[in-house]
Image: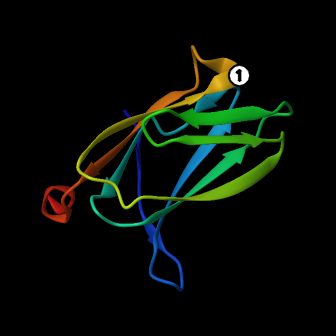
Amino acid sequence: MVLAHATFASDDVPTFKIDINKHVFDTDLVVVPANTKIKLIVHNHDKTAEEIESRSLKLKKIIMGKTEVFLFVGPLPEGDYSIIGAFNRRTATGVIRAQSKAKISN
């Protein structure tokens, strides 16, 4: 399991990044603070396009090859939210886990 770590932009929105390489998410679990708006950056290193999709987050975005996009997500109640690369459903899978800040720091 590979976790994403938060960085903070100048607007104090926690920012998380997922890289796509060879049709696989490099981070399969992104732990984010619950009830907080986050910025999710998805960088597609592949030559072909990928579509990041999450039914539970009501999220669908095509990322062309060799580009990155950013999306604002949330605030999310505590829980797990699956994300997939719709064009490579078997290999591009992950989870965004929203949990309380106390649990994240432990």
Residue at 20% over, 64% down: 101
Colour pattern of the rendering: rainbow
Residue at 33% over, 54% down: 76
Q: Quadrant of residue 91?
A: top right
Q: Quadrant of residue 66?
A: top right
Residue at 73% over, 32% down: 50
State whether residue 18 is above or below residue 100.
Answer: above
Q: Is residue 100 left or right of residue 80?
A: left
Quadrant position of the C terminus in the picture:
bottom left
Q: Residue furthest bottom?
A: 10
Residue at 65% over, 37% down: 20
Which residue position is annotated with label 1?
87
Q: Residue furthest front?
A: 58
**Where does the image place residue 43, in percent across and percent down from the top left?**
69, 48
Label 1 SS: helix
**Where does the image place residue 100, in percent across and percent down from the top left?**
18, 59
Q: Quadrant of residue 41?
A: bottom right
All told, the count of numbered labels is 1
Q: Residue furthest top?
A: 90
Quadrant position of the N terminus in the picture:
top left
**Where does the image place residue 67, in percent across and percent down from the top left?**
80, 50
Q: Is residue 32 left or right of residue 91?
A: left
